[in-house]
Image: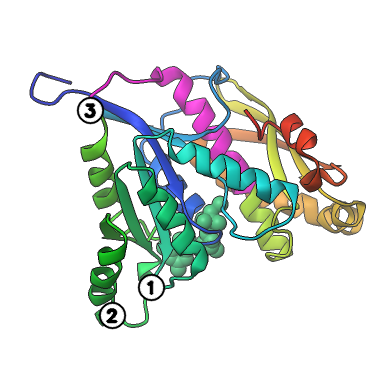
């Protein structure tokens, strides 16, 4: 129960960092906990919210920030840069995710933008479980902190190590505010996000990492009944050839993706799931901002 001593806190958090540092894994880890599926009402708010974590004391709204690229010609990357930059100014806290001690110009760029925003920055040094020389961690953080003014937290998003510590730090920086979202709207949106991430993960497992931007998963319908959830998902690819690969011989690969995804989703929702997957070619969508708009990527 919120009281005078512990006022409710709520705010927007951007999770930024270059591709593959573990942003999605971290978001999943943050929002997966304690999600109770109570509603099938569609979220009516901005599409850019990718996860909401609500407890009795606070609500963390994680807004989507696509990967950022320092030097990419295609429209999607131009757009992503713009979106990522503008979003940073739009939030209460920025969490910058790094892959262990790796530090390259892309990290530098994102970090500088984060600090320049004037918002509190928390640097999550991720993949702690894979750290080869733990002794180097503290000196590295010390050195980095001279350049990048932030709070530093080592975590493993994959194993959940110290994600609660990160969460605590986030909460300390949240403004005192009422919840932005009522609980019954939250869970469904979270589940749509979790479901699309699960499907994406299965696609990547089946195909390797060869389709960086080629695949987008859109949850077309999510309809929850007492014992069963019907989910229709569209997988967008860029080319006919990718569609063939994804579907596989007599549909075998898509079927496998569907089976694996359904199993994971069922574990999350603790209900039976009917999952239907479609593959669609959105020809050249990476190069067409209008197509991006159609996919809901642009406000
Ligand atoms: P994003 O591009 O920043 O969203 O990164 P992802 O969340 O998709 O993660 C990229 C890869 O790093 C995936 O294969 C993850 O499983 C892996 N990964 C993420 N966090 C960790 C971690 O804490 N430890 C390890 N070992 N791998 C991780
Ligand atoms: Mg991601």
Can residue 293 be spotted in the picture? Answer: yes
Q: CA distance from mark 1 to mark 3?
A: 34 Å
Q: Which residue is mark 3?
A: 57
**Residue drawn at 37 percent across, 45 percent down:** 94
Q: Earlier in the sequence, mark 1 or mark 3?
A: 3
Q: Which residues are magenta?
A: 176-199
The residue at 28%/42% (across/down) is 170
List x then y, in percent, for residue 30: 38, 44
Q: Is residue 64 visible?
A: no
**The N terminus lies in which quarter of the figure?**
top left
Q: Residue furthest front?
A: 116
Prevailing SS of the magenta stretch: helix
Q: Determine the secondary structure under disc 2.
A: helix
Q: Is mark 1 within 8 Å of ligand 1?
A: no
- Within the image, what quadrant is residue 152 found in? bottom left
Name above or below for residue 165 compared with residue 279: below
The residue tagged 2 is 136
Q: CA distance from mark 2 to mark 3?
A: 36 Å
Residue 153 lies in the magenta stretch: no
Could you say where residue 226 lies in the image, as x and y percent from the top left? 55, 20
Quarter containing the C terminus: top right
Q: Position of residue 3 (x, y in %)?
A: 12, 19
Which residue corresponds to mark 1? 101
**x, y (%) of residue 112?**
41, 56
**Residue 155 or residue 138, whichever sits in front:** 138
* 133 lies above or below 42: below
Disc sitting over residue 276 in the figure: none
Q: Residue at x 9, y 19 (%)?
A: 4
Q: Secondary structure at mark 3?
A: loop
Label 2 beta carbon within 8 A of ligand 1: no
């Amino acid at each position: 129960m919120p009281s005078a001593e512990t006022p409710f806190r709520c705010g927007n958090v951007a999770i930024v960092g270059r591709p593959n540092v573990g942003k999605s894994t971290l978001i999943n880890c943050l929002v997966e906990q304690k999600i109770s599926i109570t509603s099938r009402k569609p979220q009516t708010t901005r599409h850019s919210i990718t996860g909401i974590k609500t407890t009795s004391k606070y609500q963390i709204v994680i807004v989507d920030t696509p990967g950022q690229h320092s030097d990419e010609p295609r429209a999607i990357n131009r757009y992503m840069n713009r979106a990522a930059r503008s979003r940073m100014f739009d939030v209460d806290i920025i969490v910058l995710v790094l892959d262990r001690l790796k530090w390259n110009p892309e990290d530098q760029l994102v970090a500088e933008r984060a600090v320049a925003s004037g918002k509190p920055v928390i640097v999550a040094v991720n993949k702690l479980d894979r750290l080869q020389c733990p002794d180097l961690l503290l000196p590295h953080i010390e050195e980095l902190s001279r350049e990048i003014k932030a709070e530093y937290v080592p975590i493993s998003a994959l194993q959940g190590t110290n994600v609660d510590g990160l969460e605590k730090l986030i909460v300390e920086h949240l403004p005192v505010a009422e919840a932005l979202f009522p609980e019954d709207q939250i869970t469904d949106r979270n589940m749509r996000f979790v479901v699309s991430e699960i499907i994406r993960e299965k696609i990547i497992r089946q195909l390797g990492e060869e389709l960086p931007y080629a695949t987008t998963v859109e949850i077309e319908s999510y309809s929850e009944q007492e014992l069963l959830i019907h989910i229709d998902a569209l997988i967008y690819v860029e080319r006919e050839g990718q569609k063939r690969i994804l579907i596989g011989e007599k549909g075998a690969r898509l079927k496998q993706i569907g089976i694996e995804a359904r199993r994971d989703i069922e574990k999350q929702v603790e209900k039976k799931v009917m999952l239907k997957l479609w593959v669609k070619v959105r020809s050249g969508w990476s190069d067409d901002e209008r197509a991006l708009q159609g996919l809901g990527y642009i406000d």
